[in-house]
Image (spheres, rainbow, N blue to C red):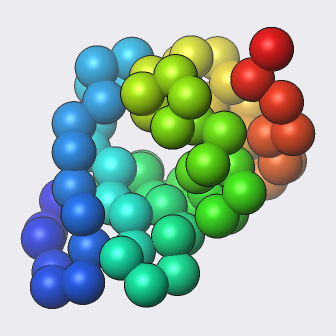
Amino acid sequence: MEQKPGWTYRFVNSLNMQIAINNFTGIMYTEDKVRYSLQEQHLLQAVDFEIPLPVHLVKKVFEGTIISIH
């Protein structure tokens, strides 16, 4: 993933890819171009961004929204 100013990057083991979080909007993208909203990003912080791969794949296919971690 090309790193650009204004973004924070980290590797997520559960997805085996990097994520990028915009420092101003909080919007998060994965390397495979899945967008997570600010609200979803806040939920994912609780699990240190270790998104279960099946959840990520369902979100990618259906463009859904994560509403709860539990």
Q: Residue 66, image x and y in percent?
A: 80, 40
Residue 18 falls left or right of residue 67: left
Question: Could you tell me which quadrant the C terminus lies in?
Answer: top right
Residue 6 falls left or right of residue 36: left
Q: In the image, is residue 25 above or below residue 48?
A: below
- Name which residue lies at 56% across and 17% down: 52
Number of callouts in the render? 0
Q: In the image, is residue 44 above or below residue 27?
A: above
Q: Residue 57, image x and y in percent?
A: 63, 30
Q: Is residue 56 visible?
A: yes
Q: Is residue 60 visible?
A: no
Q: Residue 40, image x and y in percent?
A: 69, 49
- Name which residue lies at 39% across and 74% down: 22
Q: Quadrant of residue 38?
A: bottom right
Q: Quadrant of residue 1?
A: bottom left
Q: Residue 69, image x and y in percent?
A: 75, 23
- Name which residue lies at 42% across and 51% down: 30
Residue 35 falls left or right of residue 68: left
Q: In the image, is residue 58 above or below residue 21?
A: above
Residue 1 falls left or right of residue 61: left
Q: In the image, is residue 25 above or below residue 47?
A: below
Q: Quadrant of residue 56?
A: top right
